C-alpha cells in the first residue's frame, strides 16, 4: 500500500493561511472528447487546486439536470473508462494537479474493481468519490483503492447524524465532501445555501476533525464561494461550471470565456 503523501494531502498542507482550496468538477468528455485535458490545464492556470473528473453514467442518482445533460453528451460522443484514464495520463504529462474520479459504482463493477483501481493508479488518479457507495457499502472497493494509493472521499450532508459524520471522518482520506444542501446537484440561490450551511458547518467542524473539509452543491459565483466556505477549507463548483461551458460552447473564444469564469470563482476579479 502506498504510504507517501498524496497529491491531495499536499494541496492542503501547502495552503496559505485563510486561502480557500477550490475544487472544480468537470464531466470527462464534455463538451467534447478533445477539450477535457485543455480545460483541466486551463482550470489549474486560473486557480483550481483540485479537479473532480466525472465518470459519465446513464443513471446518475445524485446529479441534477445540468450534470445529467453533460453526462449524456459525453456518452453520446463515445466516452469510455479507458478514454478517461487516457485523459488523466495526458494531464500528467504537464501537471501534478490532484485528480479525483467522481461517479457511480456500477461502471466500476463492470470494469472490475481491481482493474479499475490499478488503472486509476497507473494513469495518475489520486482519489475517488462514489456517492452511491457510502461507508456501509464501500467494502467492495475500499481495500483495492487503498492498496493502489487512492484516497477515498466520503460525503456528509445536513441530514447526517453526528455519529455518521464521525464515522465518515474516520473512513475518509484526502478530505470530507460537505454537501451544503439536501437534494441533487445544481446551482442554487446563495442565501438558500448560506442558511443551510450556517447550521450545518458548525456540526461538521465539531464532528469532522481528522480531515480537511470542502463544501459543495449550489455555489455559482465568487461571492457564494467566499460566504459558504468561510468556516471550512474550501469549496467545490460543478453545475455552475458546466452551465458556463454550455452557455459558451461552441462559440469562438468559448474556452477563454470559461477560464475567465473560473478565474472569477477563485479570485473575484471580474
Image: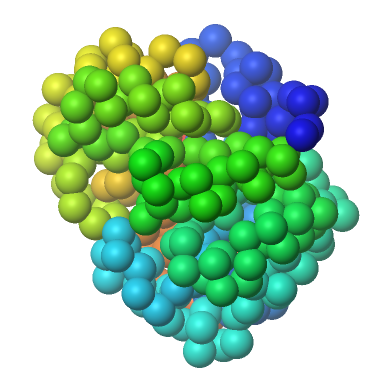
Q: Is residue 253 visible?
A: no
Quadrant where the C terminus sits is top left
Q: Is residue 21 visible?
A: yes
Is 235 positioned to the left or the right of 144 in the image?
left
- Decide which of 185, 114 is in the foreground and name it: 114
User: In this figure, which colouring scheme has been used for the structure?
Assistant: rainbow
Image position, residue 112 (x, y; %) = 63, 67
Is 111 positioned to the left or the right of 88 in the image?
left
The residue that appears at 34% across and 20% down in the rendered structure is: 166
The residue that appears at 42% across and 13% down in the rendered structure is: 209
Image height check: is 150 above or below 105?
A: above
Image position, residue 145 (x, y; %) = 64, 45
Image height check: is 206 above or below 123?
A: above
- Decide which of 214, 225 is in the foreground and name it: 214
The residue that appears at 39% across and 29% down in the rendered structure is: 168
The residue that appears at 40% across and 48% down in the rendered structure is: 137
Image position, residue 24 (x, y; %) = 51, 48
- Decide which of 181, 168 is in the foreground and name it: 168
Image height check: is 132 above or below 153?
A: below
Quadrant where the N terminus sits is top right
Q: What is the quadrant of residue 158 in the picture? A: top left
Q: What is the quadrant of residue 122 in the picture? A: bottom right
Total marks shown come to: 0
Image position, residue 113 (x, y; %) = 62, 60
Amino acid at each position: 500500500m502506498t504510504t507517501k503523501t498524496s497529491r491531495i494531502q499536499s494541496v492542503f498542507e501547502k495552503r496559505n493561511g485563510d486561502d480557500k482550496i477550490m475544487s472544480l468538477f468537470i464531466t470527462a468528455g464534455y463538451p467534447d472528447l478533445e477539450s477535457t485535458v485543455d480545460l483541466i490545464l486551463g482550470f489549474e492556470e486560473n486557480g483550481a487546486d483540485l479537479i473532480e473528473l466525472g465518470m459519465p453514467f446513464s443513471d446518475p442518482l445524485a446529479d441534477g439536470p445540468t450534470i445529467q445533460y453533460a453526462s449524456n453528451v459525453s456518452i453520446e460522443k463515445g466516452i469510455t473508462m479507458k478514454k478517461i484514464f487516457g485523459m488523466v495520463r495526458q494531464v500528467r504529462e504537464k501537471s501534478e494537479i490532484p485528480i479525483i474520479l467522481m461517479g457511480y459504482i456500477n461502471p466500476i463493477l463492470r470494469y472490475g474493481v481491481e482493474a479499475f483501481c490499478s488503472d486509476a493508479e497507473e494513469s495518475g488518479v489520486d482519489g475517488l468519490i462514489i456517492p452511491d457507495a457510502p461507508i456501509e457499502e464501500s467494502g467492495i472497493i475500499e481495500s483495492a483503492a487503498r492498496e493502489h494509493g487512492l484516497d477515498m472521499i466520503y460525503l456528509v450532508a445536513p441530514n447526517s447524524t453526528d455519529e455518521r459524520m464521525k464515522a465518515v471522518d474516520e473512513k475518509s482520506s484526502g478530505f470530507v465532501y460537505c454537501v451544503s444542501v439536501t437534494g441533487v446537484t445544481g446551482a442554487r440561490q446563495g442565501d438558500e445555501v448560506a442558511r443551510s450551511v450556517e447550521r450545518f458547518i458548525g456540526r461538521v467542524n465539531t464532528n469532522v476533525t481528522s480531515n480537511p473539509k470542502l463544501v459543495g452543491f449550489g455555489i455559482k459565483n465568487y461571492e457564494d464561494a467566499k460566504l459558504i466556505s468561510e468556516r471550512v477549507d474550501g469549496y467545490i463548483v460543478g453545475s455552475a461550471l458546466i452551465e458556463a461551458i454550455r452557455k459558451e460552447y461552441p462559440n469562438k473564444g468559448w474556452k477563454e470565456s470559461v477560464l475567465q469564469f473560473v478565474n472569477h470563482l477563485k479570485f473575484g476579479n471580474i
